[in-house]
Image (cartoon, helix red, strand yellow):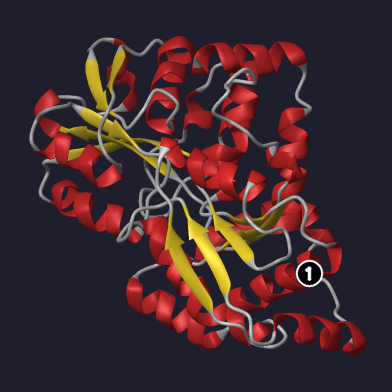
Amino acid sequence: MKERRMTRRAALRSAAGAAGFAVTRAAAQSLADFYRGKKLTLITAASPGGGYDQYARLLARHMPKYIPGEPPIVVQNMTGAEGLRASNHIYNVAAQDGTVIGGVSRNNGLAKFYDFSNAGVQFDARRFHWLGSPQQEIGLFIVNAKTGVKSIADITGKALTVSSTARSSPSSIYARMLNDLYGGRLKPIEGYDGSQACLMAVERDETDSHISGGSSAQFRNRFTPWVKEGKARVILQMGMQRDPAFPDVPTALEIMKTLADRQLFEIAFAEQVMGRPFLLGPGVPPDRVNMLRAAFDATMKDNQFLADAAKEGAEIDPVDGATINALLDRVYSAPAEVAERLRALAR
C-alpha cells in the first residue's frame, strides 16, 4: 500500500499547500483555557463495527493529545438516511463552538451536487470546515464467478444485478454511469443494510455483483478469500488510479472512450479522495478550526496512532481538510453541461 499512498500524495501535493496551521503560544493558551475540562463529541454517521466507525474510534483515542487542554473525545453513532441525518445535525443543531466533530459519509459531500432539490440535504457541503480524512478510497467491482464474467468488457453482453444500499449510493450511481457511458446492462438491487450485507448478497447468489464506493479492511477481509478461491473476480476499480493489490484490473477512467466521459467519473471520484471524512460545523470560530485541523494532521503522523491503525488493518493515506474544501469548490463549479449530465445519470 506504500506505493499507492505515495502516488496519491504526489497527485494532491499542489492542492495541499494550504494545509497546516501554526498555533502561537498565546493562542494555544487561550484554546487550552476553553477546552480544559470539556468533553468533545465525535458524531459518526456509521453503525458500530464498520470502517467509518473504526476510523472514528481511532481518531478519538489519539487526537486529544494534540488539542490544547487535552479534552477526551467520545464517539456517538448517529445512523440514518445514508449519513444525511448526522450531517444535517452537525450543520444545523450541534454546538458550533468546536466541541462537536462529525464523521460523515463521503457521498454526503456531493449529495447536493447530484440533487440540489433534495429536501433531505439540509446543508451546504462547501460551508463545513473539513478536518480531513485518514484514508482515500478505491472502490471495486466484484462479480460472482458463477456469472461467467471475466472482465469488464463482458458487462456489455450480459445482464448483471448489483447489490446496493440505496439509489443515491455509489453502488447504484456507478452502475448507472457504466450503463450509460460503457454500454453495461447492470441492474441495482437496493435496500441492503451496508457494504457487508451487499457482499453477503453476492455470496448467497442473491445478486451477481457489488460495486463498492470504498474498500475498508473489513470489506477486503470478507471478499479476498473468494478471489483467491476463484469464487469471485474484481473486474474494475472505481478510483483515480489502480490499487497495487489489483495491478491488472483497469480503473473506470481507463476504459472511458472520450474525455467528456472521463471527466464525469473524475467528478464522481471526488468522493473517493474524501475517503472517511471528518468535519466541523460551519459556525465554528476560525482559531478553533485551524487548531483542530492542525491536531488532525498531527494525529495522522503520530507513531502510536499509526501502530494501532496497522494492528487493526486500517490503511492510513491521509488528505487534509483544506484539500477537501478546495475539491468540493471545484466540483460545484463544474461546467453546467457536465454537471447536468452527471446529475441525470445519478437520478
Q: Quadrant of residue 205?
A: top left
Pointer 1: what residue? 288
Circle 1: element type? helix
Q: Name the foreground residue: 203 vs 70.
A: 70
Q: Is residue 136 above or below residue 341?
A: below
Task: Answer left or right for 195 relative to 317.
Answer: left
Looking at the image, residue 336 sits to the left or right of residue 298; the answer is right
Q: Amino acid at mark 1?
A: Arg
Determine the residue positioned at 63% across, 28% down.
112
User: Residue shown at 57%/57% (left/top)?
Assistant: 102
Q: Give the vertical position of 259 relative to 54 (above or below).
A: above
The spot of residue 160 in percent (x, y) is 23, 18
Q: Is residue 240 at all visible to an observer of this figure?
A: no
Residue pictured at 48% horizontal, 73% vertical: 74
- Asked whether residue 122 is in view, the answer is yes
Mark 1 surroundings: few (<14), some (14-19) or many (≥20) residues within 10 A: many
Q: Is residue 306 above or below residue 334?
A: below
**Number of numbered labels in the structure image:** 1
Return the x and y of residue 158 as percentages of the image width and height.
Answer: 22, 12
